[in-house]
Image (cartoon, rainbow, N blue to C red):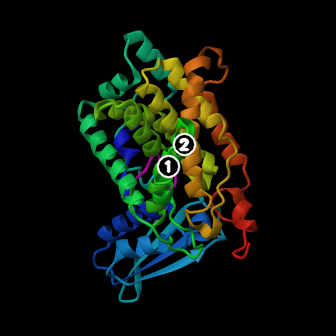
Amino acid sequence: MRSLTELYKIGSGPSSSHTMGPEKAARIFKSENEDADQFKALIYGSLAKTGKGHMTDKAIIRALSPVPTEIEFVPQADFVLPHPNTMDLFAYKDGRQTAFMRAVSIGGGDIVIEGREEKLGPDVYQENSFAEISAICKANHIRLSDYVEQCEGKQIWDFLQGIWEAMKRSIDEGLSVTGILEGGLQVERKAKYLYHQGHMDESPETRENRIVSAYAFAVNEQNAAAGTVVTAPTCGASGVVPASLRYMQEKMQVPDEQILRALAVGGLIGNLVKQNASISGAQCGCQAEVGTACSMAAAALAELSGMEIGQIEYAAEVAMEHHLGLTCDPINGLVQIPCIERNAVGAMRAINALSLAKFLSGTRKISFDLVIQTMYETGLDMSSRYRETSEGGLAKLYRMDS
């Protein structure tokens, strides 16, 4: 598996698959065709069906600017797509085509260019399953966070400190803004309102739900507004990990050093899903995005609480298992409904998974590796209407006047 530096990325929303990935591909294409006087992009499949709502066209035009660029959405391609998020780029000089590139956006801001070896970083983890990693840790009497340090080197802590600072900024920025999100749904920002709705007689449980939700809303409202967030593991699921960790840091009064170790363990969980299944909503539905984020958060919280490896695995497994089959049906292709609320629910569910792991890890029957495989097969079996195409579920049934 590759480094956590390829999982956690700081970038602009609203979608790592639909904006960060295509923008990255376009930048590469532009660098290889500096003499072009015109570009054209054909956007297929899921990228086309929700491209406007996800601002895919704007991301590509921004990357290819100032060269004039024509964008064409092709929801139904006349060939078999290598991935639901496929795009073709063309370069022209004096009216003649000079170059062509096909790229697919595989999730989390990563891309694969057809006909080329993947230019991703080297594998820094030799183990590719939780069972293998657990065996290594138990044999050497180390924690999962120690294993991350051994594989990544001590520099991983400086990287994760930067990630944590960016996560906290996205919360703070989201809590400071009010108004209506762009896109036409008239969705009102609610993070600031939630955060300030406390009452003297509010129970601890109610306060927890409100604050965690406010933090998640803050991040995902920023994401929906094309603000800066951290992929954890994607932009659309970027609120779950920071919301749950920020709340627990404040509640437990723990230093950043412990949060960084929690982020390391959460990242390890996200890496396993990315390696053995998918974190792409276009490929496996929202179970691959918010489901993975919830598993990452639950494992991170378990590490923060000093739990043993078996309990950490149980927390991650419970979090994913109860997201299985979760569809991706963004209304109007916007990362707003149900995406923003879904992150808040995911953050609270991560805390619930943590509570169960404290008491029941010894009784578990399902491994985390098995639930990853199950999620992947479930996603592939899922109708394409429920995999980020906005053709089913809420996206199909919602009417603006309802």
Whole-percent x, y for residue 289 in the image: 55, 48
**Label 2 – label 1 distance at C-alpha:** 7 Å
Residue 92 vs 160, above or below: the answer is below
Q: In the rendering, at what x and y percent does residue 10 appear?
A: 35, 53
Specify the quadrant of the image occupied by residue 125: top left
Query: How dense is the environment of label 2, judged by Cα within 10 Å: few (below 14), some, or many (20 and up)?
Result: few
**Does 127 sit above or below residue 321?**
above
Residue depicted at 72% across the width and 68% down the height: 398
Which residue does the numbered mark 2 point to in the structure image?
202
Q: Position of residue 242 (x, y in %)?
A: 42, 44
Going by the numbered disc 2, the residue's amino acid type is: Glu
Residue at 60 percent across and 64 percent down: it is 46
Residue with the mark numbered 1: 198
Q: Identify the residue shown where x is 41% and y is 50%.
A: 117
Q: Amino acid at mark 1?
A: Gly
Q: Which is nearer the eye, 17 or 194? A: 194
Q: Are marks 2 and 1 in contact (CB under 8 Å)?
A: yes
Give the residue displayed 31% in from the left and 81% down from the top: 66
Note whether residue 402 is visible.
yes
Whole-percent x, y for residue 251 in the image: 41, 34
Q: Quadrant of the C terminus?
A: bottom right
Q: Nearer the viewer, residue 387 or 129?
A: 387
Q: Which residues are magenta?
A: 230-237
**Is residue 134 shown left or right of residue 378?**
left
Q: Secondary structure at mark 1?
A: loop
Q: Is residue 171 magenta?
A: no
Is any part of residue 21 visible from this angle? Answer: no
In what element is the residue under mark 2? loop
